[in-house]
Amino acid sequence: MTILTAFIQEHAPGDSTLVEKVQEDGNWIMHHISDKPVLTIPPIHIGGFTLDLSISMKILMLMVAAVLMVFIFSYAASSNRKKKHPTGLGNFMEMMMVFVRDDIVKPSMGHGSEKFMPFFFTMFFFILFVNLISLIPGMSTGTSSISVTAGLALITFFMTQLHGIKHNGFIGYFKGLIPPGVPIFVLPIMIIIEFLGLLTKPFALAIRLFANMTAGHIVIYALIGLIFMLGYAVIPVSIGFSLFIYVLEILVAVLQAYIFTMLSALFIGMAVHQDH
Amino acid sequence: MTLAYIFLAKFYNIILFISNDPHEKKDTLLSVEPGLLIWTIIIFFLLLLILKKYAWGPLLKSLNDREQGIKDSVEKAEYLKQEAEKILAQNKAVLAKADEDSRRIITEGKELAEKLRNEMMNKTNEDTTRMINQAKSEIEREKIAALNSLKDEIANLAVQAAGKIIDENLDAQKQRKIIDGFINKIPQN
């Protein structure tokens, strides 16, 4: 930042307000993107490690999404149980579930996906709800925090390892990671690559979801910020583009939930059925 | 140019996640906070547990039941259709057989009637012929008997007449012989 400030000062000397403006505007977006504490809980000290379990805005959003999901899906369940033909919300949610089951999980995972269905339903709808809630003005984006997406990716990571080991045995699972028919002299490299591959998969999951959900919001904030930086003349352009990005974000919200669930299903499926 | 700097600055600030305020808590976008991470995992698993019990279980059950029900219904409909087709084919066969039977019976009846009629006709004809013949022979017999008695009568009358005429010259037996021979010479009719 200091380099850039110096750069601006060199090319536009004397315009100190511009520098301030730049810094301020950057902070303004950061302020909206970053987390805000809601309920502060004193940090817990475990050994030399400090764990801050304060409830922040993003955690609150996760909770709101979770509570909303519990209400909507238990309503759907009770409404579907009563009727022979589901209608309204129950029907819609069932349609979504069938979509997740038949178009996301089953093709990615193959056979034996039935017992994982509750997990993938929860994952898909949780991400979807958090993403969609973030589009409501005044709400915060749960999934635009790397900690949240890392948490979700870690769940996928541990599910992958757990079920891989459970299904193939501890030694069988790690042996199966290396493709068969590899010459002996490449084996050390392959072991390193495959081990790194295990870690990069959830890392990529976390970064993808986080970046996608953050980017859209930053672009919208930047477009709105243009109004205050360049004057009111850009209002139509700003609003138009913001609206466009906003609509795009609805697509992204669904798409990212879809991709996260699909890749999770793919990774778990690959770990469980190592032979193909 | 200045506009480009502003944009650069904005994105530089965001991409590198540098906070300009040294007093602000050092939480940039890419720093992982363990608290948030743990909360995410806790919320996720609580949600999974609750929803598994109250939503996914019943929803999946009703869904699977319905899918199974539809599958069963389709299979049953298919089965019933086959069954109905089978019955229809059977009915057709029975109908065809009945049709054939009735035709055969009618033909047989006709044949029988024809035969009976012919038989009756023949029999009647035969009877009639026989009766006519009988009658004829009876008449013939009666005629012969009548003629014979007539001959006798004539012979007697002649004998008596001759007796009266000749009187005692001739004995009755001789006379009779002569007259019988005479009468027999008379042509029969």
Image (cartoon, rainbow, N blue to C red):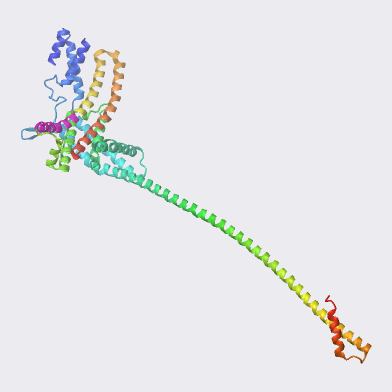
Q: Which portion, as a residue range, is magenta? A: A185-206
| Left-right relation of B119 to A276 | right
Query: Which quarter of the picture shows residue B48?
Result: top left
Indicate yes or no whether the magenta region holds residue B134: no
Quadrant (top left, top right, bottom left, bottom right) of the N terminus of chain A: top left
From the top left corner, tell me how far across and down residue B114 is, in percent: 63, 61
Residue A126 versus residue B94 in the image, above or below: above
Residue in view at x 58 percent, y 60 percent:
B108
Residue in view at x 11 percent, y 41 percent:
A171
From the top left corner, tell me how far across and down residue A6 is, in percent: 13, 11
Residue B186 versus residue A242 in the image, above or below: below
Quadrant (top left, top right, bottom left, bottom right) of the C terminus of chain A: top left
Chief secondary structure of the magenta portion: helix
Q: How many marks?
A: 0
Query: Which quarter of the picture shows residue B26?
Result: top left
Q: Is any atom of residue A198 visible in this view? A: yes
From the top left corner, tell me how far across and down residue B167 is, in percent: 93, 90
In this view, the residue in front, A104 or B1, is A104
Q: Is any atom of residue A144 visible in this view? A: no
Q: Which residue in the rendered view is the most extreme toward the right?
A: B165
